[in-house]
């Protein structure tokens, strides 16, 4: 099969470290965390001590100052394990990236060292009951009051919501200005006026806390603003490619993984006097799934390389997210079918992979939104070419 060329020996040595950490600190306990609907805080401290959190944060802010591929290794190995409880991806790839990219010196020095160590858990507060993919329609209001802002509103489907210590919060500071009225804040969740709702019961990813969040006259200083007033939507748009790439990375790994253990299962499971893998239909199906997974992997790796060169644009990332998400759900479904009735049992990893898969067509922008972004750009390019 096509060999990957992105990673060097240091990355692979780190991959071994991450795999050992997962085997020791996550695998024995994850079933209980799924029952609890949350992972313990001390796991984050252990992950921080192992160097697994926010690998790209510069040394001056408590990090290791490594390249993006070290974060990719963590995302890949977590996805490969099938243990979806720890919300490391949101914490590292989104929240820390927002702070690192747009935070003031004081904000970086306050939050980043604590995020690297796992002492402070990060979350992203954007989705609302009436505003999911269309973030310019959010209703959470931030009203200036002297040197402070007073925030009122609600968020929903917030990963790490039950445990987060810092929240990148999208608000409206000018309700009439549409996208130009969106402003981001770094919210310290220990402040009065911040309230966590219930831990939501989900179809999949049962070990990851996902919450409603409420803001009742939450008063924060203007110095907690992330970037400039009215520039929040613009800042969010600059990070969409990275967010959607992370979704593609996870999907690529899951596809490879479920094909591998479906092959192992069918090679041992017998029916009608031979193994299921000996049957032509099974071989044809596995061949199709393996080919799709390799194509998805190759495309994803190219997008990672482009991202590291600063050349991955929002449309390319949307294509990666759309293609890999659809492939992810299709491959997991096809693999479960080859397990027969056992594939429907929660004790089998394929059942959990199936439940966990469905969110990928929604999270990070729905498939329909990705299609709109791609189609709109195609039409724009065509019209420019005809002008």
Image (cartoon, helix red, strand yellow):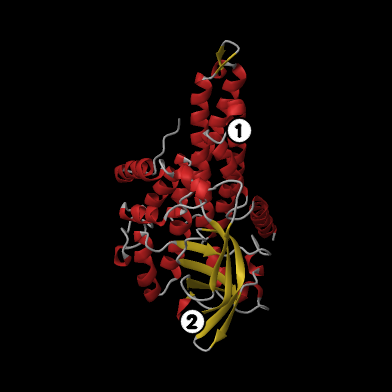
Q: Position of residue 342 (x, y in %)?
A: 58, 28
Which of 2/42 is in front? 42
Residue name at image x 45 percent, y 62 percent:
122
Quadrant housing residue 213: bottom right
Q: Is residue 101 positioned above or below 42 on the image?
A: below
Q: Is residue 249 visible?
A: no
| Secondary structure category for the residue under label 1 | helix
Which of 213 and 319 lies nearest the eye of the viewer?
Answer: 213
Tag 2's secondary structure? helix
Q: Is residue 3 above or below residue 160?
A: above
Q: Position of residue 46 (x, y in %)?
A: 34, 53
Query: What residue did someone put label 1 on?
Result: 344
- Taking the image as shown, residue 384 lies to the left or right of residue 126, namely right
Query: What number is the disc on residue 222?
Result: 2
Residue 215 location, quadrant? bottom right
Question: What is the crowding at mark 2: few (fewer than 14 residues within 10 Å), some, or many (at least 20)?
Answer: some
> Quick one: label 1, few (<14), some, or many (20+) residues within 10 Å?
some
> Where the N terminus falls, by quadrant?
top left
Q: Residue at 50%, 20% (x, y): give it.
A: 267
Q: Is residue 43 left or right of residue 182?
A: left
How many angstroms separate mark 2 from mark 1 (CA)? 51 Å
């Amino acid at each position: 099969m096509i060999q990957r060329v992105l990673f060097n020996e240091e990355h692979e040595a780190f991959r071994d470290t991450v795999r050992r950490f997962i085997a020791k600190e996550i695998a024995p306990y994850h079933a209980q965390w799924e029952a609890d609907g949350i992972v313990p805080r001390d796991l984050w401290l252990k992950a921080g001590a192992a160097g697994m959190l926010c690998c790209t944060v510069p040394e001056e802010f408590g990090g290791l100052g490594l390249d993006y591929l070290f974060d990719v290794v963590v995302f890949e190995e977590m996805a490969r394990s099938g243990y979806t409880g720890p919300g490391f991806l949101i914490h590292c790839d989104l929240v820390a990236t927002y702070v690192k990219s747009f935070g003031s010196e004081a904000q970086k020095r306050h939050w980043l060292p604590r995020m690297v160590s796992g002492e402070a858990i990060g979350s992203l507060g954007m989705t609302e009951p009436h505003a999911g993919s269309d973030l310019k329609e959010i209703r959470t209001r931030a009203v200036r009051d002297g040197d402070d802002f007073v925030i009122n509103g609600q968020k929903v489907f917030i990963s790490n919501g039950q445990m987060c210590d810092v929240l990148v919060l999208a608000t409206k500071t000018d309700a009439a200005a549409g996208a130009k009225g969106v402003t981001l804040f770094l919210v310290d969740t220990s402040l009065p006026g911040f309230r966590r709702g219930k831990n939501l019961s989900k179809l999949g990813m049962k070990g990851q806390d996902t919450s409603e969040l409420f803001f009742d006259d939450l008063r924060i200083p203007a110095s907690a603003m992330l970037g400039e007033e009215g520039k929040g939507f613009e800042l969010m748009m600059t990070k969409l490619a990275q967010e959607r790439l992370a979704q593609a990375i996870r999907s690529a790994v899951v596809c490879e993984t479920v094909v591998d253990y479906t092959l192992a299962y069918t090679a041992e499971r017998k029916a009608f006097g031979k193994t299921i893998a000996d049957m032509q239909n099974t071989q044809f199906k596995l061949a199709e799934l393996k080919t799709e997974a390799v194509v998805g992997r190759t495309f994803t790796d190219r997008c990672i390389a482009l991202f590291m060169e600063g050349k991955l644009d929002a449309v390319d990332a949307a294509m990666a997210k759309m293609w890999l998400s659809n492939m992810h759900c299709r491959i997991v479904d096809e693999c479960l079918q080859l397990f027969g009735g056992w594939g429907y049992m929660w004790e089998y990893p394929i059942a959990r992979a199936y439940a966990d898969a469905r969110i990928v067509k929604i999270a990070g922008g729905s498939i329909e939104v990705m299609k709109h972004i791609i189609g709109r750009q195609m039409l724009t390019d065509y019209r420019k070419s005809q002008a």
